[in-house]
Image (spheres, helix red, strand yellow):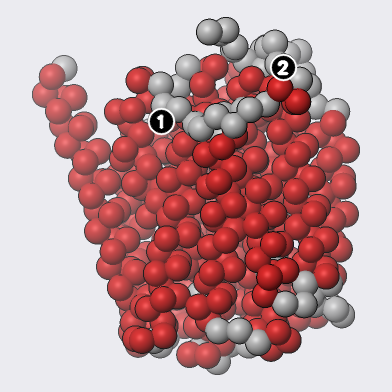
Amino acid sequence: MTDRRTARPTTGRFHYLVAAAAFAVCMAGTTLPTPLYGLYQDEIGFSELTVTVVFAVYALGVIGVLLLVGNVSDTVGRRPVLLCGLGFAACSAGVFLAADDVPLLLIGRLLSGFSAGLFTGTGTAYVLELAPPGRRARAGFVATAANMGGLGCGTLLSGVLAEYAPDPLVLPFVVHLVLVAGSFALTLRLPETVAGARPLRTARPDRPSLPPEVRRVFVPAGIAAFAGFALLGVFTSVSPAFLGTDLGVHNHAVVGLIVFTAFFASTLGQLLVPRLGTARAIPLGCLVLIAGLALLAVSLAWTVLAPLVLSALVGGAGQGMALRGAVGEVAAASPAEHRGGALSALFVVAYFGISVPVIGVGLLTGPVGLAHAGLVFAACMAVLAAASGAYLLRLARAGAAGA
């Protein structure tokens, strides 16, 4: 088997920031519809369960791509895969511009999932590899911040445009198409980081694999990523309806801002990881995530806005700590030639956290109501986060005892 390692290209000091900007643009497109679901419901007519299904189709698209071609960039190179991802992002925006029924919404979300699936693991690896040796630690933050910050900026952008600009179901996607075109042009100019990359036409489906070195840290990292992404999934798919029907908040910009707060807090939480260390960041992030879930439960149970906003801040920070810790642990344990595949496998688990609980909440909403469905979700995710944190603490104690 050919040993393909990342190249050491002589690149500019800021090429990794350019790659991160393209990463953020792609991820922003995946959350553009979040503040718009109410408008689509008014125009097309569908239930809250349909909203969660439309949202979950995006996650299934991400998972499908990660499972089939999650590590293909380790052989054909990072740049061609990201260019394909931007192509899918443009196609998704085009479908949303024409969307006038649920099937088109589903297709648009599926294409959006394809774009995110191609970017998630590969974009993270590309940003890390483009960074100069002295900026590798900063590049880890930049990569995860581009991922989560891009997701947050998508909701904020479409919420503001929907509330204060004309054509709320058109203008956000036109703006995104312009951003995608600029990102495509910039990504074309970036150097390749995979030595001996083969032509894109030689790419074949190949599920992500875990090298033996990664398996010990992968389980707790994956559980923490699952719980954190589940919290963000509920915020992006269910909170607009809860804000509108239960709390009487109908301003699209405010809805977008509250969802953005969770992703912004995630980015802030990631800033704490270098001081904590990646190994400690995951259990501490799980603890903070549990506090955020508790605040979400308070908001749902008593129909109060303030705990929901605090839940976005606290839960988002915990998710960011756990995610950056997980990415750092998995990336550090992975051999260079398998890094893209290992990171893709981590995000497969994370995106199951977006899809499965969100559909579960949607199914429960009919018989028990949105608030009670959210309470069931919060309890289940708190148990998972606690299990991940406890497992890591036990590993740490075992390591200390054996030292």
| In the image, residue 298 above or below residue 18 | below
Q: Secondary structure at mark 2?
A: loop
Residue at (64%, 77%) from the top-left corner?
37
Q: Nearer the viewer, mark 1 or mark 2?
A: 2
Horizontal placement of 385 versus 39: left or right? left
Residue 69 can be seen, yes or no: yes
Residue type, numbered disc 1: Glu
Q: Which residue is mark 2?
A: 198
| In the image, residue 385 above or below residue 11 | below
- Residue 109: image quadrant is bottom right
| In the image, residue 166 above or below residue 288 | below
Percent position of residue 14, x then y: 75, 29
Residue at (57%, 7%) from the top-left corner?
2
Horizontal placement of 342 versus 299: left or right? right
Residue at (29%, 28%) from the top-left corner?
216
Bin the neighbour count of mark 1 within 10 Å (Cα to Cα): few under 14, some 14-19, many 20 and up.
Answer: many
Residue at (55%, 84%) from the top-left corner?
47
Horizontal placement of 353 versus 66: left or right? left
Q: Secondary structure at mark 1?
A: helix
Residue 147 can be seen, yes or no: no
Dot 1 or dot 2: first in sequence order is: 2
Percent position of residue 74, x then y: 61, 22
Q: Quadrant of the C terminus?
A: top left
Percent position of residue 139, x then y: 60, 31
Horizontal placement of 124 versus 320: left or right? right
Percent position of residue 141, x then y: 56, 38
- Residue 151: image quadrant is bottom right
Instruction: Estimate the spatial distance between the alpha carbons at disc 1 and disc 2, rounded to whole Å.
Output: 28 Å
Q: Which residue is mark 1?
A: 329
In front of the other: 388 or 98: 98
In front of the other: 357 or 293: 357
